[in-house]
């Protein structure tokens, strides 16, 4: 039997096969993940040293199924990257976000991992795992961490994630710095959704989000001829992309300014359709491609002053 921090120890009735008790493994005593384990039982919230018997098995964190051994006490680098990049099931938080919020709250209170772990009644190794790896701690562990960090389980889980970004705490010592052209181009090329500022057909200014691609330094997006984004054609426009990390109170933004034109060459249009990463979220028939050639590219990033 080998386990990982965060795995579940499940004890079943040998007669019926039904679960009699389960708990989260919050402490290991051997680097290879063999017993004994420190287990926080889900029914009592008590942490005890457990030497599993024949009626116990491990339910591994990333599979949710018993009996799959990873053969080590920590995931390897490739496994961590795969878990980090995997999309979470609908309605569930990204597992890595909980650990990041725990780390932010711990630093905000000036607590070491050892002190936080002592207050939450978990091992420092498990807290390190929780902060650095994708993990799904039990409700009992979240309750103890919330109490230790003077916050709430809802906050650690990311309640309010659908609220507009920027409502979190500002950094104690923020640094706002300008980005160079190369970094701006790199951030812009990550694709996604950008904000297009145009003068609409009625002459009034408008800002609309569009799905975009970057092709040979040009920003391209699909729209309908009678839409607000189509008003960009033949004018100089501004196009903005940004990213806000609410958990870590940091972020960046890039602003591109330049003329917009409609793409009419058939081969170019077919090439854009082939390489498009996504369909327009707005749906409907949107076959008009608009290209923006930036003549000015600027950006800014907010980070802690000591980084």
Image (spheres, grey):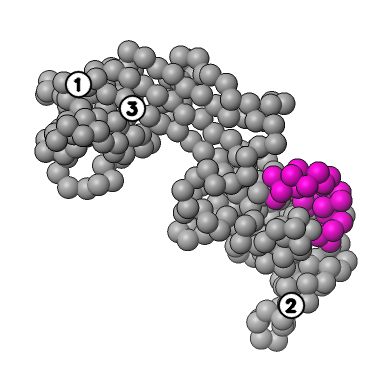
Give the number of the mark in front: 3 or 2.
3
Start-end of magenta stretch:
102-127
Which element type, helix, strand or loop, lies under badge 3?
strand
Query: The C terminus lies in which quarter of the figure?
Result: top right
Left of 289 or right of it: where is 295? right
Residue 115 part of the magenta-drawn span? yes
Q: Are marks 3 and 1 in contact (CB under 8 Å)?
A: no
Query: The N terminus lies in which quarter of the figure?
Result: bottom right
Q: Are marks 1 and 2 in contact (CB under 8 Å)?
A: no
- Residue 150 pos. (x, y %): 75, 58
Which element type, helix, strand or loop, lies under badge 2?
loop
Residue at the outermost bottom position: 15
Measure the C-alpha gap from mark 3 to mark 1: 12 Å
Give the number of the mark in front: 1 or 2.
1
Measure the C-alpha gap from mark 3 to mark 2: 54 Å
User: Label 3: few (<14), some or many (≥20) within 10 Å?
Assistant: many
- Residue 252 pos. (x, y %): 51, 30
Left of 143 or right of it: where is 118? right
At a point 47% along the width and 29% down the height, the residue shown is 253
Q: Which mark is residue 43?
A: 2
Residue wearing tag 3: 239
Measure the C-alpha gap from mark 1 to mark 2: 65 Å
Q: Is residue 131 visible?
A: no
Residue wearing tag 1: 235
- Residue 5 pos. (x, y %): 75, 55
Q: Is residue 97 visible?
A: yes
- Mark sitting earlier along the chain (3/2): 2
Depth order, front residue of 297/29:
297
């Amino acid at each position: 039997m080998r386990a990982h921090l965060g795995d579940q120890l499940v004890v079943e009735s040998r007669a019926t096969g039904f679960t009699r008790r389960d708990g989260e493994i919050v402490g290991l005593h051997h680097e290879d993940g063999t017993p004994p384990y420190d287990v926080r039982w889900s029914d009592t919230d008590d942490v005890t040293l457990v030497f599993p018997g024949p009626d116990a098995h491990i339910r591994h964190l990333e599979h949710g199924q018993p009996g799959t051994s990873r053969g080590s006490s920590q995931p390897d680098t490739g496994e961590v990257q795969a878990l980090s990049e995997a999309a979470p099931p609908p309605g569930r938080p990204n597992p890595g976000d909980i650990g990041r919020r725990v780390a932010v709250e711990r630093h905000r209170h000036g607590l070491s991992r050892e002190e936080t772990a002592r207050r939450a009644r978990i091992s420092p190794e498990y807290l390190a795992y929780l902060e650095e790896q994708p993990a799904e701690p039990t409700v009992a562990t979240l309750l103890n961490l919330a109490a230790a960090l003077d916050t709430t389980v809802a906050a650690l889980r990311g309640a309010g994630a659908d609220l507009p970004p920027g409502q979190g705490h500002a950094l104690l010592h923020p640094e706002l710095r300008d980005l160079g052209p190369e970094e701006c181009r790199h951030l812009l090329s990550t694709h996604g959704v950008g904000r297009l500022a145009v003068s609409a057909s009625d002459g009034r200014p408008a800002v609309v989000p569009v799905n975009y691609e970057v092709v040979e330094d040009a920003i391209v997006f699909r729209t309908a001829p009678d839409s607000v984004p189509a008003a960009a054609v033949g004018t100089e426009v501004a196009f903005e992309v940004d990213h806000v990390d609410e958990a870590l109170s940091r972020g960046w933004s890039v602003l591109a300014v330049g003329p917009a034109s409609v793409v009419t060459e058939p081969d170019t249009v077919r090439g854009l359709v082939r390489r498009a990463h996504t369909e327009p979220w707005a749906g409907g028939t949107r076959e008009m491609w608009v290209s923006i050639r930036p003549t000015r590219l600027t950006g800014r990033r907010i980070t802690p002053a000591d980084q």
